[in-house]
Structures are given as structure tokens and as C-alpha cells.
Image: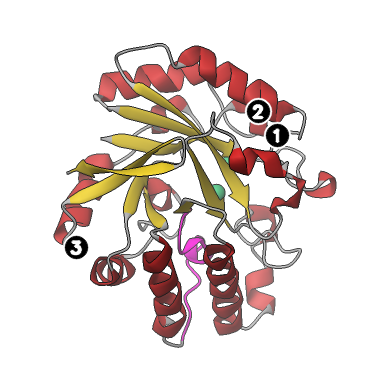
Amino acid sequence: MMDYHVHTPLCGHAMGTPQEYIQKAIEYGLREIGFSDHAPLPEHLRQNITMEPEEAEEYITMLQKLCHTDKVAVKIGFEVDYPLHTTFDTRYFNDSRIDYIIGSCHFIGNWPFDHPAFVEEYNRRDINQVYHDYYTIIYDMVAAGLFDIIGHFDLVKKFGHRATKDMSKDVEYILQAAAGKSTAIEINTSGWRKPVKELYPSYDILQKMYEYNVPVTLGSDAHAPEEVAYNFDEAIGIIKKAGYRKIVGYKKRKQYTIVL
Ligand SMILES: [Zn+2]
Ligand SMILES: [Zn+2]
């Protein structure tokens, strides 16, 4: 089993050394641990949220040094914001040291909708429009074709705000596009640690993903070593219940299959 979504202190809001995350992965018996720290956002947005552009090299070199353990495979990835990815040097999209790139949306326009300090904005907006705007960004992100994995698919539910209209058409457009490009969607267990207390994505979306034949990865979104592999037993049970018998991993941006 693998955890493909863990952070490092370079982003400014995660604790513990990468060695401690790796140690936790070994204790849990993971075969792979993949770091996917926040790639640089534009300067006015990145303080304590992402690394600086010049730290990307430091990040890769630091992880390369940790790859030399036979107890667990260490993968090097990034979590890149869409559409705010332009601060991230384009050469990293064609860099053989990188195993995979997660595309995530944390901003609707200028609104950091998953940031607790800006949660009031949900009450000022039409919630169905918020969901539609969010899923439109995710669709565009898949269509852009830059990313291997879609991060926390329905993050917009983080604080428990629910669309009152049926969003399944928006979701299905994305799943169709993702299946066509073999873009994976991560099963992200951090939702269980947030006010929504639910897996990203929700079970009904997960069932649709299986119908559409969308590949899945697994990640804890750990920002501290003790969060590595968070609730994975439960998550794997749910993935299997939806029908999946295999998930996918990546090496140098090439996808491969792992039997559950
Ligand atoms: Zn983070
Ligand atoms: Zn994220």
C-alpha cells in the first residue's frame, strides 16, 4: 500500500522531518511513500502555504537523499495549484526526477475557499454556484492534461457546506475526461480530520468513478508524521466496496497498477 500525499516543512504549515514521515510509513508497512508538497503559488499568496520557487530544487535534492532505503520506496511529487500553477517552473513538468504531479484547486478566483480564515465567504455566495465554479476549475485542470492525479476531488465540501442542487452532471463531465486521459483521482483521508468528517471524494462519487473506470491513488494529506496512512484500513475497505480491486502508482510520471 502507498501514501501519495504527504507534506514537508518547506510549505510552512507542516510539522516533522521527512525522515519521520518515512519512519511512520515503514512502521505502518507501506510499500511506498510519496511526498507531494505544495509547489510555489504566486508571491502574494504563498506565505506559509507553499515553498518558494527557489526551494523546489532543495526539496527534490532533500528527497533524493532519502530514497536510498529498501524498506519503503520514496517517491517525489508535487501538489500544484490550478489555475495558479504558473509560478511553478514549467521545466518541472518534464523532469525525470519527478514521479507524479497532483493537481489541486484551493482557490476559486482569489478566494482560498479551504482556508478556515475565509470560511464566512460561503455564506455570502450562492452555494450551488460555488460548487459549479469549483468543478469547472477541476474540469479545466483535467483538460489541461498537466497532472497525473486530481487532489481531494470534492474539497469544496470541507466545512460542511453542501450544494442544494444535483451536481452529478458537473462531476460526470470530469470523470469522463479523467477516464479518457487516465488521470487518477486520489482517495484522500484528510476529509475525516476536517469539519465535513467525510472521505474525499464522497462514496457516491467514488461509485461513479468506478463505473467510469477512473484510476485511483491513496493519500493521507499528512501535515505531521502521525497522520501518515491516516485511517487507511477504513479507506481501503470503502474503495473495495465501490468495486475497485486495484489502485495505481507512478514512477517518473509513468502509471502502474497495484493490486489491493
Ligand atoms: Zn497543506
Ligand atoms: Zn491540497
The answer to whether residue 247 of the structure is visible from this angle is: yes
The answer to whether residue 49 of the structure is visible from this angle is: no
Question: Is 209 in front, or is 128?
Answer: 209
- Amino acid residing under circle 1: Met
* Quadrant in which the C terminus appears: top left
Q: Is mark 3 within 8 Å of ligand 2?
A: no
Cβ atoms under marks 1 and 2 closer than 8 Å: yes
**Cα–Cα span, label 1 and label 2:** 5 Å
Magenta region: 151-164
Identity of the residue drawn at 42% across and 84% down = 169
Q: Disc 1 on helix, strand or loop? A: loop
Check disc 2 and report the residue beneath it.
10
Identity of the residue drawn at 54% across and 60% down = 145
Q: Disc 3 on helix, strand or loop? A: loop
Q: Which mark is residue 51?
A: 1
Is 177 on the left-hand or right-hand side of 14? left
Looking at marks 3 and 2 on the same chain, the residue that comes earlier in the sequence is marked by 2
Q: Quadrant of residue 25?
A: top left
Return the x and y of residue 142 as percentages of the image width and height: 52, 64
Is 90 on the left-hand or right-hand side of 228? right
* Quadrant in which the N terminus appears: top left
Give the class, few, some or many, for how many residues have Cα within 10 Å of label 2's Cα (few <14, many ≥20).
many
Q: Which mark is residue 242?
A: 3
- Judge whether residue 154 is colored magenta: yes
Looking at marks 3 and 1 on the same chain, the residue that comes earlier in the sequence is marked by 1
Q: Please, is residue 107 above or below residue 29 in the view? A: below
Is 131 on the left-hand or right-hand side of 27? right
Question: Is 255 in front, or is 31?
Answer: 255
